[in-house]
Image (spheres, rainbow, N blue to C red):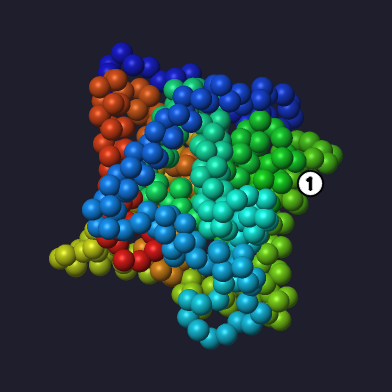
Amino acid sequence: MSSTATRPTPRATTAPAGSPRPAPPPVLRRAAPALLAYLGVRLTGLLFLTLWAHRQHHGVWPILAVQWDADWYLGIADHGYAHVLGTARDANNLAFFPLYPYLMKTLAVLTPGSRASTGLGIAVVASVVAAWGVFAVSDRLHGRRVGVLLTVLWAALPVGLVQWMGYTESLFTAFAAWALYAVLTERPLLAGVLAALAGLTRPTGIAVAAAVTVWALLALRRRPFDRRLSAAAVLAPLGWCGYVGWVGLRLGRWDGYFAVQRLWHNEVDGGVQTLRRMREYLMYDSTPELFFVLVTCALIVAVVLYGLSVWDRQPLPLLVFTGVLLVIVLCSGGVYFPRARFLLPGFPLLLPLALHLARASRRYRALALTAAVLGSAYCGAYMALVWPSAP
């Protein structure tokens, strides 16, 4: 680390609740270096995947657009949701939230190609919007350099390939990032609406709702008659609660959604299953599967980064979002291997790393980012072509 490097001067954080102030719009030109870097990282990963797939005589299109969760979303877009709970394990599509498949169904009418191509296009466009939001949050807090670095780190996550697959992570991250930016810039109604949309996109949308609602309720202590804050507190959880309530009505039981999750082995066990699997792969399995080791390390690193985020005194909405997200992922007794992907939207966890790189020398920064990009390209291709299950 360079001894002469200094920490970037923090930008404005969340304004005091009693003194709202206007914020300049997030100009696209300012974000251009971050977005170009993001596209460069993801195109590198896509090129590596294409070359590896060609050597194995695999097509890249099915990997990105129609496999695993993407197939479930296409099924919802084509045939709608199940009407009964049933007893079959891992078979009820009510576990998947509705915004992405119905957005895919709607836009497919207006665009050429199949619904699969439309779904993949939504994911790619949403990933760029998400990268812009990631930059905007970090730029607001710590300046442009940290914003670019955070965007690159988010793009270069080991499971970053999912950002360009027919999955919901990119769309969800876009809603989460811009909801947090709306909070940081005192736009309560926008924050509430985006949180509600996040809640219609993924089960972990409740983490975005919690961040916005907690911020709005705390702000109401100083501005008790602010209708926008009250509306934000009410709007934020409506998406998640609305879908969970709808599933209950559809199945005729109050715990309908949670009954569906139990069929997918997603019971909450307080982290017992997570700790058991970690111990198994790190201590007792002499030849653990590489992907399991990757997931285990990702979970451990995420917990450490959350501790550093608390130490750095990140704004409360960011800590609430990543904290609730971590609790959901770590305390689930469900399938273990997708957990690194479930944490992909938690971009504020990477802020301590971005700050460290911003203070480092150019040589150190270049080596670290190069290693991250190449590692992400390899892990993404391995996840898609060698790992036999969903990412």
- Up-down: is 26 above or below 242? above
Q: Nearer the viewer, residue 107 or 350?
A: 107
Q: Quadrant of residue 367?
A: top left
Name the residue rendered at 54%, 21% in the picture: 30
Q: Which residue is tagged 1?
A: 231
Q: Is residue 111 visible?
A: yes
Name, please, the residue furthest toward the bottom: 87
Instruction: Point out residue 41 in the picture as x, y percentages from the top left corner.
Output: 38, 36
25 up-or-down from 215: above or below = above
Total number of numbered labels?
A: 1
Q: Residue furthest left?
A: 286
Q: Amino acid at mark 1?
A: Ala
- Residue 210 visible, this angle: no
Question: Which residue in the rendered view is the most extreme toward the top?
Answer: 4
At horizontal 55% and vertical 64% (from top left) the residue drawn is 74
The quadrant of the image that shows the N terminus is: top left
The spot of residue 132 in percent (x, y) is 54, 34
In this rendering, position of residue 322 left or right of residue 367: right
Q: Position of residue 97 (x, y in %)?
A: 60, 62
* Residue for point 66% across, 30% down: 185
58 with respect to 326 (left or right): left
* Image-based side of 27 in relation to 347, left or right: right
Identify whether 100 is placed above or below 3: below
